[in-house]
């Protein structure tokens, strides 16, 4: 079974992956593309550019396509579409070239677990980079997952609450 954790930055995806792996020991966590690329020596712009997000999207798609076992992906390809839409320069992005490949990758995922921003913000006591981008991305991601304008066909479970509550919701959904 392949799961992708979806949400804006600082929304609890990595923590949720760590909670889930305790109950799904036959799974492997696939780190988020930003960290995979950074570990390979890539340097991202500050602020991030559309090229940065497209590179992460490519990395995400490559990881899903290469998966042979049970994986928990720390981010879904749809996250990067949302970042591209939320950031400056989105008018220059050729989304049509990405959609067929994203659609094929989404078909390989059994479930996307979406952790939206909540009120009050669970990260309110921690400084978060680019709060406006974070909020815009979360709003755009919700729209992409709920309305599915590109007909990606993702199976989505929205989770809320503490890290443990979110993990319980996923495991209950999976029948574990």
Image (tube, rainbow, N blue to C red):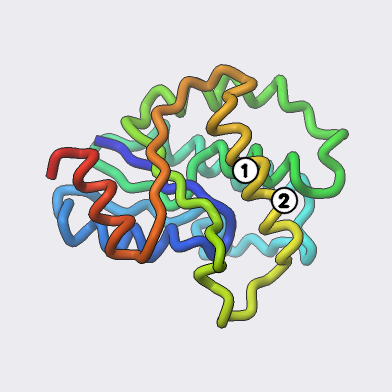
Calculate the distance from the C-alpha at mark 1 to the C-alpha at mark 2: 13 Å
* Residue 48 on image: x %, y %: 75, 58
Look at 61% across and 41% down and name the residue there: 141
Q: Could you say which disc has been placed on residue 136 in the image?
A: 2
Q: Quadrant of the N terminus?
A: top left
Nearest the eye: 162 or 81:
162
Do the CB atoms of the residues marked 1 and 2 lie less than 8 Å apart?
no
123 shown above or below 156 = below
Please identify the quarter of the rendering in which residue 107 is found.
Answer: top left
Q: Could you say which disc has been placed on residue 156 in the image?
A: none
Look at 38% across and 38% down and name the residue there: 157
Secondary element at tag 1: helix
Look at 54% across and 73% down and name the residue there: 123
Earlier in the chain: of badge 1 and badge 2, it is 1
Please identify the quarter of the rendering in which residue 155 is found.
Answer: top left
Q: Quadrant of the C terminus?
A: top left
* Residue 10 on image: x %, y %: 54, 65
* Mark 1 Cα shell of 10 Å, populated few (<14), some (14-19), many (≥20): many
> Does 166 sit left or right of 98 as displayed?
left
């Amino acid at each position: 079974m392949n799961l992708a954790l979806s949400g804006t930055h600082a929304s609890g995806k990595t923590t949720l992956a760590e909670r889930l792996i305790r109950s799904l020991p036959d799974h492997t966590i696939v780190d988020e593309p930003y960290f995979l690329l950074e570990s390979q020596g890539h340097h991202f712009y500050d602020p991030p550019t559309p090229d940065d997000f497209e590179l992460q999207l490519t990395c995400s798609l490559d990881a899903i396509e290469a998966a042979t076992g049970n994986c928990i992906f720390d981010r879904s390809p749809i996250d990067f579409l949302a970042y591209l839409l939320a950031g400056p320069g989105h008018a220059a992005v050729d989304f049509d070239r990405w959609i067929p490949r994203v659609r094929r990758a989404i078909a390989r995922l059994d479930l996307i677990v979406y952790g939206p921003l909540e009120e009050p913000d669970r990260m309110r006591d921690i400084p978060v980079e680019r709060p406006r981008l974070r909020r815009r991305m979360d709003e755009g991601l919700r729209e992409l997952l709920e309305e599915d304008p590109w007909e990606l066909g993702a199976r989505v479970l929205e989770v809320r609450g503490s890290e443990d509550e979110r993990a319980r919701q996923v495991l209950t959904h999976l029948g574990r």
